Amino acid sequence: MIGVILAATTAALAAPVAALFGHRAVRRSANAALMRIDSPTGIDEQRFVRIGGIEQWISIRGEDRANPVLLEIHGGPGAASSPYGARTREWEKHFTLVRWDMRGAGLTFARGGAAAQGGPVTFDRLYEDALEVTRYVLDRMRVDRVVLMPSSFGTVFGLRLARNHPELYSAYVGTDQNVQEAGRDTSAYRATLERLRAAGKTGQAATVEAMGPDAGRWTSAQRASYDKLCAGSDPLTLDTVKKVILGSLWLSPLYTLGRIKAYFQGQGFSETVTEGASGFDDWADGTRFEIPFFVFQGALDVITPAARAKAYFDAVEAPVKAFELIEDASHFAWVRRPERFLELLLTHVRPVVTATPTPAIR
């Protein structure tokens, strides 16, 4: 994913520099004003917390502390969700939203670079960090459980957290849902090859073909290369990367130019995390969950196809479950269509975790 973002960055910087930075300053100021929480019952804590022996960035924000707490687990690896505050500001009227930049990602990486990450970033280390973050949030908010909302590669963590620790989470809400199948499903790989060939990109198609369809055999570098070609070959995904992902990063009040640079460096630093999940099999690990289970997926997702997510969802046994497609969205559906995603959270999730009627969107 980092290659697609960097390519989009180069194109953006080709605009007249003065106009570009002037527009950025105005928009960042407007976003800072938008992000203010003035409610007497609200909370706005954005700070570094010692997790797993290092300082990691955690944001806890919402207009009413009595609202359900929603903990995000971001994807990537290294694709921190800290830049998206302005896009999901409306969510904070109905949920207390917790964002955590994992070690090796976002503001956590920017704080001290590679030297401050406590050594190599592994899947197991991040999993243990996620548990520690969860317990920190439970204690800080004085609640028994939180809603778990992982996205993309974060869902690889999320399924295991929800399955192994139902005592910590009131519901699972997956988006850009990954389903690890030990290399059995090659539909996304084949579709990527078809798009590249149809576009006449024979060299890129040859690169993907040479990797072979079994993602479990790819190195972390090959995985990063594939992600770039998969996303870049789909116009809707590429448009989302340019306008939503890069746009949010560029206009976030939290991100100076130095932090933007560190964001990309963190993604490169975190690439090897995927190798820790290469042999996972979510079907073999079990499809029974003790908590409500929801998946809200981009209908046109080419990275984590909706059909694969739906097949796994259909096999899930849970007290309550629901699957919804988000139309006109590929990967990153939750930030491309945040208003639709909030509607789904209010329709399906909030009533289950609060046992109260759905509030109207203001």
Image (cartoon, grey):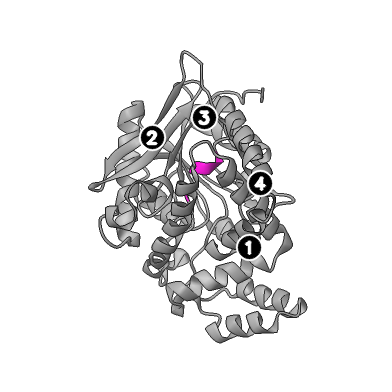
Q: Residue 305 carries which label?
A: 1
Report crowding for label 3: few under 14, some 14 to 19, many 20 or more residues within 10 A (C-alpha). Answer: many
Bounds of the magenta segment = 80-84
Q: Nearer the viewer, mark 4 or mark 1?
A: 4
Which residue does the numbered mark 2 point to in the structure image?
145
Quadrant for the N terminus in the image: bottom right
Which residue does the numbered mark 4 point to in the structure image?
336
What is the distance, in whole Å, between disc 3 and disc 2 at their CAs? Answer: 13 Å
Residue at image point 50% right, 52% down: 317
- Let me know if residue 83 is in the magenta part: yes
Which residue does the numbered mark 3 point to in the structure image?
95
Report crowding for label 1: few under 14, some 14 to 19, many 20 or more residues within 10 A (C-alpha). Answer: many
| Mark 4 / mark 1, whichever is N-terminal | 1
The kind of residue on which mark 4 rests is: Arg
- SS assignment for the magenta stretch, majority: helix
Q: In this view, does 73 lie above or below 119?
A: above
- Let me know if residue 190 is in the magenta part: no
| Mark 2 / mark 1, whichever is N-terminal | 2
Q: Are marks 3 and 4 in contact (CB under 8 Å)?
A: no
What is the distance, in whole Å, between disc 3 and disc 1 at their CAs? Answer: 28 Å
| Mark 4 / mark 2, whichever is N-terminal | 2
| Mark 3 / mark 4, whichever is N-terminal | 3
Label 4's element?
Answer: helix
